[in-house]
Image: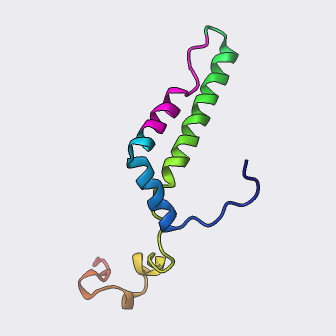
Amino acid sequence: MIIGQPPAWTKDAAEIVQSFLRSPVGTAALAHIAARRPKLTVGTDVNAAALAGSAAAGYERCIDNFLSLADIPAAEGDAKPADDNYPDIDDNSKWPEDKKPQPQKK
């Protein structure tokens, strides 16, 4: 069991996970993991049903977390600053000429 902070996740690591998930072994492993999911049918006891639902939800979240490791992390400089995505509506110098807000005429 790993205890402590996980190491940084890299593009190379994500590509290895992608390759594994596409391989016959990865596909078979996911099928086995899915087959071992907690059962929701536990009878009529309300408390047991609630616990089974929580266990199934936790199991599903764990699988989703594992599958998300195949997502390639964005590089440090890839994201645009929020200023460029949404210019200040009150600063006309940040808007293209055809997109500048025009005062409404009364």
Report the magenta residues as a range: 28-42
Instruction: Report the quarter where the C terminus lies.
Output: bottom left
| Residue ID at (47%, 79%) | 81
| Residue ID at (37%, 91%) | 93
Q: Which residue is farthest left?
A: 98
Q: Is residue 91 left or right of residue 37?
A: left
Q: Is residue 100 left or right of residue 77?
A: left
Q: Position of residue 25 (x, y in %)?
A: 44, 42
47, 99: nearer the viewer? 47
Whether residue 30 appears in magenta in the rendering, the answer is yes
53, 74: nearer the viewer? 74
Tell me how the rendering is colored: rainbow
Q: Position of residue 70 (x, y in %)?
A: 46, 55
Q: Is residue 37 left or right of residue 22?
A: right
Q: Position of residue 68 (x, y in %)?
A: 49, 52
Q: Which residue is farthest top?
A: 44
Q: Position of residue 94 (x, y in %)?
A: 38, 87
| Residue ID at (73%, 47%) | 1
Q: Is residue 14 above or below residue 32?
A: below
